[in-house]
Image: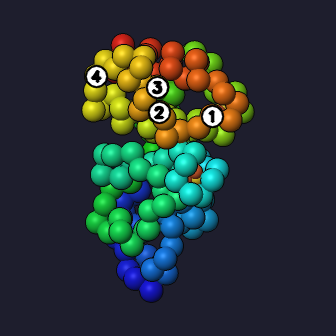
Amino acid sequence: MVAVNITINGKKISKDIQDNTLLSDFLRENLSLTGTHIGCDTSQCGACTIHLNGNSVKSCTTLVADCEGGEITTIEGLSKNGKMHQMQESFKKHHGLQCGFCTPGMVMSAIDLLEKKKNPSEQEIRDWLEGNICRCTGYQGIVAAVKDAASKM
Ligand code: FES
Ligand code: FES
């Protein structure tokens, strides 16, 4: 067992966990933050993407023990005072989702992109989201949503 102290969506959490606990399992099973989805469990689909210390990471291949002292944001932590994040608004406006399974990971990855590059080109958006797979193949709406968010964020 190992003791971890982390901040998740602004809330400090201290817990004793098994050394090999994956962050995706911890979020979903211990904290009921089920907006973080698990699609492949092997770092390929991006459905489990969250922010760790301001960077998007795949939580299915991140150990909670390696997050000690870190700040994590999940899809549940994006809205403020009942108002959705601009990226969520843009996904809604441009129909950037169909079944919604990939959406939390897409949104978290796309926000990280805009924090690193203000006005990415369409190709840059597509390249960045290469690690996020949409099984419904709704990429056109996703790219349009990210472009829209880029113009407003
Ligand atoms: S569940 Fe983590 S990348 Fe697919
Ligand atoms: S909207 Fe269904 S997997 Fe992307």
Quadrant where the N terminus lies?
Answer: bottom left
Q: Amino acid at mark 3?
A: Arg
Whole-percent x, y for residue 43 in the image: 52, 53
Q: Amino acid at mark 2?
A: Leu
Residue drawn at the location 64% of the way across and 24% of the way down: 138
Disc 4: which residue: 118
Residue drawn at the location 44% of the way across and 68% of the way down: 63
Proximity of marks 2 and 1: CB atoms separated by less than 8 Å? no
* C-alpha gap between disc 2 and disc 1: 10 Å
Residue depth check, mark 4 versus mark 3: number of the one nearer the observer: 3
Which is nearer the N-term, disc 1 or disc 3? 3
Disc 2: which residue: 129
Whole-percent x, y for residue 84 in the image: 49, 29
Under circle 4, the secondary element is loop
Proximity of marks 4 and 1: CB atoms separated by less than 8 Å? no
Instruction: Give whichever of 86, 64 is nearer the camera.
Output: 64
* C-alpha gap between disc 4 and disc 1: 24 Å
| Mark 4 C-beta to ligand 2 under 8 Å | no
Disc 3: which residue: 126
Which is nearer the N-term, disc 2 or disc 1? 2
Dot 4, how many residues are within 10 Å of its Cα: few (below 14), some (14-19), or many (20+)? Answer: few
Which is nearer the N-term, disc 4 or disc 3? 4
| Mark 1 C-beta to ligand 2 under 8 Å | yes
* C-alpha gap between disc 1 and disc 3: 12 Å
Disc 1: which residue: 134
Question: Residue 114: which quarter of the image?
Answer: top left
Which is nearer the N-term, disc 4 or disc 1? 4
Residue drawn at the location 43% of the way across and 68% of the way down: 64
